[in-house]
Image: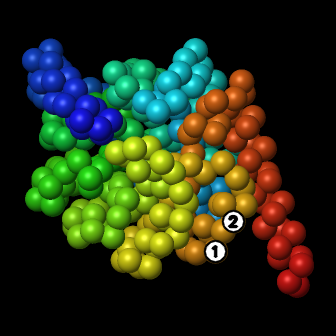
Amino acid sequence: MNILDKIIANKKSEVQKSKDLYPTKLLEKSIYFESPVVSMKEYLLRPDKSGIIAEFKRKSPSKGAINPYASVEQVTIGYMQAGASGLSVLTDQEFFSGKNEDLTEARKFNFCPILRKDFVIDEYQIFEAKSIGADVILLIAECLEKEELKSLARQAKSLDLEVLMEVHSKEELSKLNEFVDIVGVNNRNLKDFTVSIATSINLFEEIPKNLVKISESGINDPNAIVKLRKVGFQGFLIGEYFMKTAQPAKTCQDFIKRIKYIEETYKNAIA
């Protein structure tokens, strides 16, 4: 059993326990069911933003503890002040040391789009995402059958949530449907956790032109962002590179400044 299989098996058990403790009718009483969603698509396309979705992440299955005592409030506020286009918050507890309360805390202190980063396999989790203040849910093509993914995406749209569909191969793009807003290419193979940004570059032309496209995972060099932007990517999900430092928000700020410097230097060189 690979890492992804273990995560999904655990998630099924976790979701059932949550259903027993917090029925959907209870989730619907959350104040966030009445709150308007902040569009990740719009923020990623804003010229005054960096396109970076900065992630709050304490741990990963491949690296273990990354930044276990980081403050959600300080890091997420700092990310947005640094010029991030949005936030991603891990809520999986067993493998990433996340929790739903982390996302709600990020929501409390930030007016921006927030992605609930988790392994969604059940409609219940979509109601849960809405109830904790998320604007976007993640649907991982590798974890879901085509009709399952479509059903979950449809449910998300019925709650006004945006849908980020994550792929790692050309075959997984066959699961696209009309309810998907953003396609994310994961540079990390979820079965063995190897990473290469070539995955994003090779898949770009296969993704429909009308969809917002982001590159995810393994991005630790501003030059890679510049390269991916030239290909056509509009967003970049980065977590571990920022979170492994003592000051994630400062690292994010410096990273964004470096991107701007490289792009300005390139423009001046060809002017």
Across and down, in percent, residue 14 comes to 20, 23
Look at the image and tell me whether residue 108 can be seen. Answer: no
- Quadrant housing residue 147: bottom left
Is the residue under label 1 in contact with that under label 2 (CB below 8 Å)?
yes
Q: Residue at x 81, y 63 (%)?
A: 262
Q: Which mark is residue 133?
A: none
Color style of the picture: rainbow
Which quadrant of the figure contains the C terminus?
bottom right
Work out whether 66 lies above or below 234.
above
Under tag 1, what secondary structure? helix
Q: Which residue is mark 2?
A: 226
Q: Residue at x 43, y 60 (%)?
A: 185
The amino acid at mark 1 is Lys
Across and down, in percent, residue 182 comes to 39, 61
In the drawing, does residue 53 fall left or right of residue 185? right
Q: What whole-number distance in Å separates the C-alpha atoms at marks 2 and 1?
A: 6 Å
Work out whether 22 lies above or below 149.
above
Q: Which residue is mark 1?
A: 230
Which quadrant of the figure contains the N terminus?
top left
Seen from the viewer's position, the closer of residues 60 and 49 is 60
Seen from the viewer's position, the closer of residues 206 and 169 is 169
Q: Residue at x 53, y 57 (%)?
A: 196
Under tag 2, what secondary structure? helix
- Quadrant housing residue 75: top right
Seen from the viewer's position, the closer of residues 109 and 182 is 182
Seen from the viewer's position, the closer of residues 199 and 211 is 199
In the drawing, does residue 267 fall left or right of residue 131? right
How many numbered marks does the figure carry? 2
